[in-house]
Image: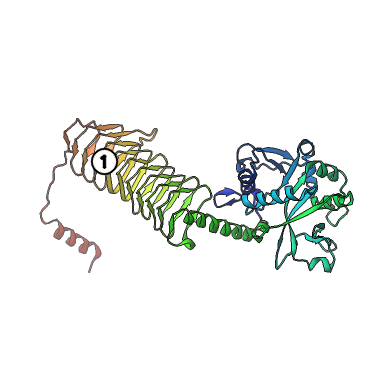
């Protein structure tokens, strides 16, 4: 990966790569407390879902060595499911189907496989006369496999189901006599067969289960497929995605039926979108909650809430802590931060609202600014219900404007405005006759002939 970030922490559609197979196992077969085996001194806790056990592999000695690190837990179990942390496209249904095959065959081990036109360095699956698995031949380095074995297109998907007792016994007997000097998990399979146990095969119909990630190029490939699945899931659930090719939706985003996602839109993190809402075109939402029948064209929203019927944008920026109540509006070139815009209140255009409470039905004219920072602390502005804030008003926090109050155009409000009052700033206009001609003459004199 050429990265300072552990490989399995790289995000795939907003979710750490390692979380994908863990959540799939939880959904597919109810694995409530999966075990994650990590390399020595590798911290991947930030990418793990809740209810996960972590075991450290004492040394990096292969897949077999990794599973041996969990031997005490295996000896207490009945069935063991083994997944790869860098295979994010293994679905819950695929895992459920694998375990169903394992139960039906009564096998000591069931191996998931896939057929690839270009199997590359994946382990080749060698079958016996009955179609069961004879062994898996590694192909990572010259000498691991013969030319005949390399010609096999069915490969090991790196996902297994085991009878726990049989796995524990075989793990104690595998060796590391190979080109890498590693313990391969696949080597337990011939040992089981030698003991007279059955090793079944579950052929996955979708070859994307094989898509392991080892480079940034493979990461992009995995994310493209995950994004395609996410978009399809939402569209089948009644969401209109106008142009899937230019739409990005993270794995944990929730969208209600009859929402419309316009081109160039990104929905990230734990964003939720209500029914009948239109997002985009060209909008980005991160960890944001939208109610029903909201419109958000060409805007950027982060960690905020927009209630039903509200309007945002175009070209609006809603920062963390912003909240629009029902039918409120934050219009063109409006920035809102840590503020609540009351029901039906409007900030139509060209305004900054920071650390403020805007009452229901109020209207803020163009150029309104809440001057919330005094150089040491953030102060709040409170505007009551049905207030009318004139254009280019500057509200120097902390300050309050009462219900139904007005401010004049260009006012600088430093003191509280009583309910129903009009606040203006003294700024007498003075006209200087002949100023333009005098200015032109002076400029010509300075420039010379």
Q: How many marks?
A: 1
At x 10%, y 54%, the residue is 433
Q: Is residue 16 above or below residue 242?
A: above
At x 24%, y 42%, the residue is 363
Q: Position of residue 345 (x, y in %)?
A: 27, 42
Quadrant of the image occupied by residue 392 = top left
Q: Does residue 324 appear to the left or right of 135 in the view shown?
A: left
Looking at the image, which residue sits at the far front? 104
Q: Nearer the viewer, residue 206 or 211?
A: 206
Quadrant of the image occupied by residue 167 = top right
Looking at the rendering, in which quadrant would you find the N terminus? bottom right
| Residue 39 appears in the figure | no
Q: Does residue 282 appear to the left or right of 154 in the view shown?
A: left
Badge 1 is on which residue?
394
At x 35%, y 49%, the residue is 294
Looking at the rendering, in which quadrant would you find the C terminus? bottom left
Q: Position of residue 308 (x, y in %)?
A: 34, 44
Q: Nearer the viewer, residue 119 or 443?
A: 119
Q: Is residue 378 above or below residue 346?
A: above
Q: Position of residue 281 (x, y in %)?
A: 39, 58
At x 83%, y 55%, the residue is 180
């Amino acid at each position: 990966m050429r990265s300072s970030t552990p490989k399995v922490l790289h995000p795939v559609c907003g979710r750490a790569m390692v979380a994908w197979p863990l959540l799939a196992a939880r959904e597919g077969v109810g694995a409530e407390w999966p075990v994650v085996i990590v390399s020595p001194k590798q911290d991947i806790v930030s990418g793990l879902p809740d209810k996960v056990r972590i075991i450290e592999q004492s040394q990096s000695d292969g897949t077999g060595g990794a599973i041996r690190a969990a031997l005490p837990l295996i000896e207490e179990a009945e069935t063991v499911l083994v997944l790869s942390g860098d295979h994010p496209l293994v679905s819950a249904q695929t895992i459920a189907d694998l375990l169903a095959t394992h139960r039906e065959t009564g096998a000591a081990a069931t191996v998931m496989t896939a057929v690839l036109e270009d199997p590359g360095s994946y382990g080749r699956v060698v079958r016996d006369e009955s179609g069961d698995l004879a062994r898996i031949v590694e192909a990572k380095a010259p000498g691991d496999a013969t030319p005949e074995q390399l010609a096999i297109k069915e490969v090991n998907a790196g996902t297994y189901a085991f009878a726990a007792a049989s796995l524990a016994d075989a793990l104690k007997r595998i060796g590391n006599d190979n080109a890498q000097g590693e313990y391969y998990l696949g080597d337990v399979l011939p040992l089981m067969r030698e003991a007279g146990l059955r090793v079944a095969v579950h052929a996955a119909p979708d070859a994307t289960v094989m898509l392991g990630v080892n480079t940034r190029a493979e990461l992009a490939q995995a994310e493209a497929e995950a994004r395609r699945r996410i978009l399809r899931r939402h569209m089948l659930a009644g969401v209109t995605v106008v142009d899937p090719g230019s739409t990005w939706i993270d794995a944990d985003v929730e969208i209600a039926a009859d929402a419309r996602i316009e081109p160039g839109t990104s929905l990230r993190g734990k964003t939720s979108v209500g029914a009948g809402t239109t997002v985009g075109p060209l909008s980005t939402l991160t960890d944001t909650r939208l109610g029903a029948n909201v419109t958000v064209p060409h805007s950027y929203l982060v960690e905020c809430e927009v209630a039903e019927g509200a309007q945002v944008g175009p070209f609006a920026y809603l920062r963390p802590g912003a909240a629009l109540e029902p039918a409120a509006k934050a219009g063109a070139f409006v920035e809102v931060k840590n503020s609540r815009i009351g029901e039906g209140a409007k900030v139509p255009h060209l305004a900054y609202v920071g650390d403020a409470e805007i009452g229901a039905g109020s209207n803020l004219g163009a150029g309104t600014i809440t001057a919330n920072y005094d150089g040491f602390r953030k102060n709040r502005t409170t505007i009551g219900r049905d207030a009318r804030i004139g254009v280019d008003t500057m509200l120097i926090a902390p300050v309050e404007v009462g219900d139904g109050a007005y401010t004049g155009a260009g006012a600088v409000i430093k003191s509280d405005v009583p309910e129903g009052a009009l606040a203006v700033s003294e700024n007498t206009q003075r006209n200087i006759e002949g100023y333009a001609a005098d200015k032109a003459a002076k400029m010509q004199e300075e420039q010379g002939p």
